[in-house]
Amino acid sequence: FIKNEFAAACLRAEVQWSIADYIPGALLLSGGVIFILFAARKMKTAVISLFISALLAVNLSALLLAPKAGQFVQRAAIDFYRAHSNGASYVKPLGFKSYAYLFYTNKQKPENPNHNNKDWLLHGAVDKPVYFVVRVTEARQHEEWFPDFIRLYEKNGFVFYLREMPEKQPQ
């Protein structure tokens, strides 16, 4: 039913669920059952129990389920950024905006002033390997534009590429 290829790929992410993740739903369900049981006789008790169960369910959902949403949306990219956090390469998202790569690659101020120059990273004589992260919806287009990119793998809506350093010219 989902028409967006990137969103569909994100939803195929492998996320570990635990029994605790079902607690908010169980609380909300129990509040609803109590409301139905007491609604005819003690409306005040029924409304209070529904309110309290909803309050607890919403707060627990935020606590337990919100981190899972992040795993669906960008876990593959974050894992890739972390794997390339040693400073031995440049890492850059291509075709979308993100600050995650700056944090998860532990990016320090590079010595090369071109470190953030997109044209240099794409076409220039780079001094380190360059890794690009592209959304799956734009991967085909980037592969046509940059045939020298090495496609490493695709995961959860992202495609990961390597642009190797150009061969040094003999002098």
Image: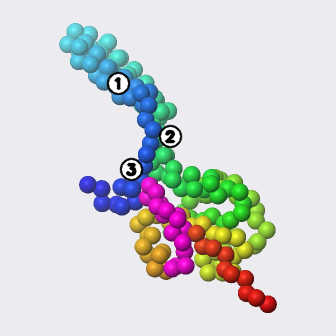
SS label for mark 1: helix
Number of other residues with Cα within 10 Å of mark 3, as a class: few under 14, some 14 to 19, many 20 or more = some
Residue range in magenta is: 146-161
The amino acid type found where label 2 is placed reads Pro
Verify whether residue 150 appears in magenta. Answer: yes
Label count reads 3
SS label for mark 3: helix
Residue under numbered circle 3: 11
Residue 48 as seen in the image, left or right of residue 72 = left
Residue 18 lies, with reference to residue 94, above or below; the image says above
The circle drawn on residue 122 is none
Verify whether residue 67 appears in magenta. Answer: no
Q: Earlier in the sequence, mark 3 or mark 2?
A: 3
Observer-nearest of 24 and 41? 24
Residue under numbered circle 2: 67
Observer-nearest of 97 and 129? 129
Residue under numbered circle 1: 26
SS label for mark 2: helix
Q: Earlier in the sequence, mark 1 or mark 2?
A: 1
Number of other residues with Cα within 10 Å of mark 1, as a class: few under 14, some 14 to 19, many 20 or more = few
Residue at 38%, 50% in the rendered image: 11
Can residue 93 be seen by looking at this rendering? yes
Report, in whole angstroms, how far the alpha carbon at label 1 lies from the one at label 2: 19 Å
Residue 63 lies, with reference to residue 91, above or below; the image says above
Considering the image in quadrants, where does the N terminus appear? bottom left
Residue at 36%, 55% in the rendered image: 8
The amino acid type found where label 3 is placed reads Leu
Report, in whole angstroms, how far the alpha carbon at label 3 lies from the one at label 2: 14 Å
Q: Position of residue 153 (x, y in %)?
A: 49, 62
Q: What main secondary structure does the magenta stretch of the protein show? A: strand
Nearer the observer: mark 3 or 2; the answer is 3
